[in-house]
Amino acid sequence: MSAVTVAGRPMPDLTADLTAGRPLGGLPVLVRGMGPGLAEALSPLTEGYGGRFTQNRGGEVVYLPSGAEPLIYLGSGRGVPCHAAIAYRPHCATVPEPRFAAPGALPRGPAHFRREVWPLVAKDLAFAYYRELLTAHPERARMTWAEFAPAYAAEEWGSKAARALIRNAVPRFADRLDFDRLDRPLGGIRFGDRAGLQRWTRGYLDADLTRRADPSFGADLALARALSQARDALAGTRHADPWLDGFTRFVAEGPPAARLVELRALAAAGVVMFLGANLQVRPHGREEVWRVSGSAWPGTVEVHAVLDARDIVDRQEEYR
């Protein structure tokens, strides 16, 4: 793999050093990337240094540090890990076929994805989401699905009328689908210190684990299934888009819930600290010292190693 260069200085290939057993214990380490392979990336930095997961008397998963681990800082493009996988079944057995983003409805020539293609895809995704919500939980809606569906189909996605229709039909804010909030949970949020970010991220993990285990939020599963279908339908066409692929992985292809339970335990033990999204990594003074800042908190932290979670997983596969 090619070396990463930041501000003109090549980062050392610490991924290979980690695989070869280079000691990082006691050092502050930045792990970039919080995708589905995060647990595999964290394991050699935690259990690999003698720590272990166990359960307390209340049955809660906790991490018992050895004291030899690195201090692990975590950050990614979105600043949060992928959503946990969903284990329950949806009320609606099938996913609606693309209707608004059907092949005949898409632009015929080259098109700007976010302006011309995404509104059609988003309308299909929300159609699947609200169908599940209104048919499985009519008590949480002011309209029946039979009333909502034709009115929804007639409105342009994102228009004032479409937003008003959804607010009318779905009174609870928590039940409404907000793609911007889903895609960038930390968007526009800034904390006074890193401690505030830690509390927020641990609360985000708690809420995600609770929601992904609760069948009353089956509309989330309908959305995940529709996302995978939409991504696959566009794959290989001129309308395929890297953002949609990443968004689908984030929402629909996350790790088992047990992995996020372990991440929460690592954070509670103080072994992992979250740095959020939009990290800036710059060389600082001595060789192999890096200064890290983020958009969600003031100040900087210094680290002695910068690891890419995706590279760690790839290298582990190479060495097996």
Image: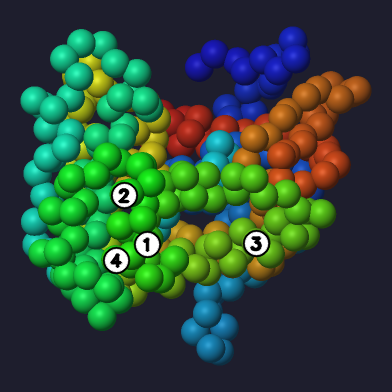
Q: Residues within 10 Å of mark 4 (few under 14, many from 20)?
A: many
Question: Does the residue at mark 1 contact the one at mark 3 (Cβ under 8 Å)?
Answer: no
Query: Which residue in the structure is indicated by mark 3?
Result: 200
For residue 167, the mark is 1
The residue to which callout 2 is attached is: 162
Sequence-first disc among 4 and 3: 4
Question: Seen from this angle, which residue lies furthest front?
Answer: 161
Residue at disc 1, secondary structure: helix
Q: Are marks 1 and 4 in contact (CB under 8 Å)?
A: yes
Q: Residues within 10 Å of mark 1 (few under 14, many from 20)?
A: some
Where in the figure is residue 236, as x and y percent of width and height? 19, 20
- For the point 61% across and 54% down, which residue is it? 46
Q: Amino acid at mark 3?
A: Trp
| One can see residue 267 in this view | no
- CB within 8 Å, label 4 to label 3: no
Q: How many marks?
A: 4
Q: What residue appears at the point 74 percent right and 10 percent down from the top-left corner?
A: 8
Q: Which image quadrant: the C terminus?
A: top left
Query: Residue 146, percent across and down?
Result: 10, 64
Residue 311 in the image, given as x and y percentages of width and height: 50, 30
Which residue in the rendered view is the most extreme toward the right? 285
**N-term-proximal mark, 2 vs 4:** 2
Element on which disc 4 rests: helix
Say which residue label 4 marks: 169
Above or below, comparing residue 33 to residue 92 in the picture: above
Q: Quadrant of residue 24?
A: top right
Q: Secondary structure at mark 3?
A: helix
